[in-house]
Amino acid sequence: MPLDTRLGQEIFWQQIGHGPRPALAIHCTLGASQLWAPVLEPLGDQITATLFDQPNHGRSAGWDATEAEAGAFQRLVTQIAASFIDRPVDLLGHSFGASVALRIAVAAPEAVRSLTLVEPVLFAALPDTHPEWQALRAKQDHLEQMIAEGNLERAAAAFMHDWGAGAPWETLPEHQRARFIQQMPMVGNISSANFEDPGGIAREGGMETIDAPVLIVHGDSSPPIMPHVAEAIAARLQDVGTACVPGAGHMLPVTHQAQLTELIALNLERS
């Protein structure tokens, strides 16, 4: 399992499967590449999937958000992900990872054979007048305030309540809580990019250039903004299908692996 220096960062990555089609899967904030493995292993005869841990996640080295400008982490992860692509790939992303995948697809549509977006958190796809955008923006302001004031444990607990797999904060292992607390300044940098879109993913005419088959997946128990984001993105794509998974929340790759595998297989067939 290799550890490479990419864009000046020590990055852990691995491959699963042995199929003829290259794939690249990008994990969510506070997750790790291993979350994708149970979803993609059943597709191993079709794809060879590259998975990597983003900086300050999993087994990759840390990343200091202290001096970073807004959106710096999204740009860095996009560049690291792109460094694994040398021919058209089946590109998959979950949550923040889906935003990164979409940024790659907008910048280089020729590099994407198929695109699967699971719970994409590109809130900038909605107008800032949308009531769900405004409600979530208020939560984001509160999160950023807690981080700025150094209330990192409160920030981590609030973030996991909204975007975690449903386990109460106090039931998480102590080492996991400590890691999430340490990651909060990075989360602030990531979350701001989801609203402000420094990479111009939602710019006029951007998503419209993607001609690969796209699948957008969300859960019916996800945060209320998510179906609206999925609908807004889908409306701008040439070849798109959407799926709502019953009983699923935001952490769909963890809680509904079999259903997600089946949906990804359908999108692979379309390309």
Image: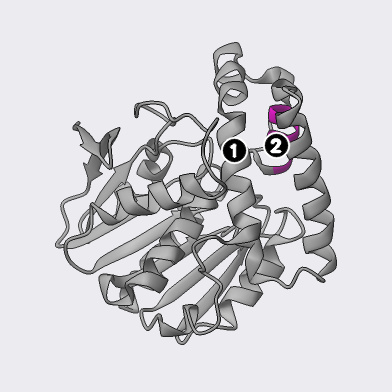
Rendered image quadrant of residue 172: top right
Colour treatment of the image: one colour
Viewer-nearest residue: 153 or 161:
153
Q: Which residue is tagged 2?
A: 159
Rendered image quadrant of residue 180: top right
User: What is the distance, in whole Å, between disc 1 and disc 2 at their CAs?
Assistant: 9 Å
- Position of 186 with respect to 91 (left or right) is right
Bounds of the magenta span? 155-162
Q: Position of residue 214 (x, y in %)?
A: 44, 74
In this view, 211 is above or below 160: below
Viewer-nearest residue: 196 or 106:
196
Instruction: Name the quarter where the N terminus is drawn.
Output: top left
Give the main secondary structure of the magenta stretch: helix
Q: Are marks 1 and 2 in contact (CB under 8 Å)?
A: yes
Crowdedness of circle 2 by 10 Å Cα count: few (<14), some, many (20+)?
some
Residue shown at the point (50%, 59%) measured from the top left: 99
Return the mark for residue 187: 1
In this view, 30 is above or below 244: above
Q: Position of residue 159 (x, y in %)?
A: 70, 37
